[in-house]
Image (cartoon, rainbow, N blue to C red):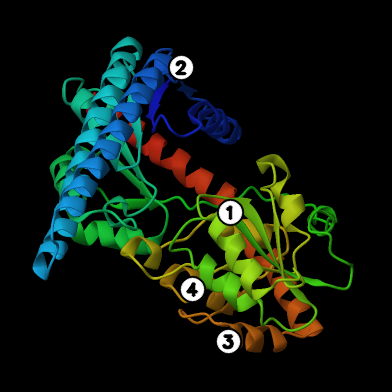
Amino acid sequence: MMVILAVASLFTPLRVLLNRIEELMSPFGLLPSLIAGGSLLAAAWLLVRQRRAHRSSKIKQREIFGAVASRSVVRGGIGSLLIKSRSMVSSLLSTLHQSRKQLVVSRVYRQELDRLKPQAVHCHDLPMLPIGAKWCETHASAFLVFDSHELYEEVSQMHPLKRRIWQRVLRRESPKVDGFITVNDSIAGEHARRYPSLPPAVVVKNATIFDDEPLAPSRLLRAAADLEADRRILLYQGGFARHRGLEGLVRAAAQMPEPWVLVMMGWGNIEDDLKVIARNVDPGGRRIRFIPPAPQAELQSWTSGGDLGVIPYENTCLNHWYCSPNKLWEYPVAGVPMLVSPFPELKAVIDAHGIGICIPEELDGTALSQILSGIDEQRLETMQKACRTYIEHDNWAVYARRLVDLYASLFNLRRQEA
């Protein structure tokens, strides 16, 4: 029995993830034992304590700078200097907090590695790589797999100090990696350019499972949004976060032509802000509706009730520019074409398969209205049929095979070396 320890962030549903991977890989004849440590609960408690301490330090920081500002005569460059100083202190505190958190996570997973003595350590994203690399250094028979879900050091709003730290970490650890996985060709190319010591990337996309049976459109979405049968639904599903173009999308939706309605299905820390925008631009709620997120197991049925999906991300960082989010498969597998930002990976799918339309980077009501007005019944039906063809040839079975083949090749290499 092969033992693999998958090292993932404690803030992800790790056991669900591992169970899913095991379920998907078993039909291919490779049934790994993917085990998360029993000491995760203790680690979670330590992280809660660290989070409280971090929050307390942030409050103290605000009090200090608030007192300084209220007692100072802020003129000219002094105010700017104060703001910059606060930003610097905030970044340093955040970096120190992340370092402490990383130490806790490292200690827990090192204990599990020592207990399990796995033949492979699969590290999910950059923060987990040093943990696996450190252990594999002293256990030469085990190999190290780095699974990069994104350009981690290029995520939106990352402070330059943190960016430099993570770049240095990956440069240091990349020569130790035996197998490298990432989510698309653009990110694979960028890693190859920046970190030539990494092995050639195996691209395993975030594709969905495809069922041969066509999915009949469900009324779940329409009923939850309280929409009549003759209304067209432009659907956004997923997290409500900044830099995803959601504020602009909601503003633009007020100018959509009849019979289109924007349905926002999800959650997130800017939900209240989006609802305020919606009330301002669409006071009667005729054009914009918000509904809670759908359960993951039912998501495909809910999505199938839409007429078009939308991925309106902003070009605020290289990670967004090269993104290929889950929605790139979640919409088409439900038979729903897409409106997408004109970024390389998104545009390539649209151009190659005819399953949607690219929107301008700066989306406004006029542009959105023109796009929707140009989509008649025949064009919508053509794009819906193209979704089926696309997902038949680009689904999880394709990438599961790649993942299994990578492990098979690594183990075969070990056997040859022995």
Q: CA distance from mark 2 to mark 3?
A: 57 Å
Q: Residue at x 32, y 55 (%)?
A: 151
Task: Say if residue 300 shows up in the picture.
Answer: yes
Q: Residues within 10 Å of mark 1 (few under 14, many from 20)?
A: some
> Which is more foreground, mark 2 or mark 3?
3
Three-letter amino acid code at the position of disc 2: Met
Going from N to C along the chain, the mark reached first, 4 or 1, is: 1
Q: CA distance from mark 3 to mark 1?
A: 23 Å
> Which is more foreground, mark 3 or mark 4?
3
The image shows residue 217 at horizontal and vertical percentages of: 83, 59
Disc 1 on helix, strand or loop? strand
What residue is disc 2 on? 1
Q: CA distance from mark 2 to mark 1?
A: 38 Å
Residue 135 shows which numbered tag? none
**Residue 139 is drawn in which quadrant?**
top left
Going from N to C along the chain, the mark reached first, 2 or 1, is: 2
Do the numbered discs 4 and 1 sit on residues whose CB atoms are within 8 Å?
A: no
Three-letter amino acid code at the position of disc 3: Ala
What residue is disc 4 on? 348
Going from N to C along the chain, the mark reached first, 3 or 1, is: 1
What residue is disc 3 on? 367
Q: CA distance from mark 4 to mark 1?
A: 22 Å
What residue is disc 1 on? 238
**Residue 227 is drawn in which quadrant?**
bottom right
Q: CA distance from mark 3 to mark 4?
A: 21 Å
Q: Residue at x 80, y 55 (%)?
A: 215
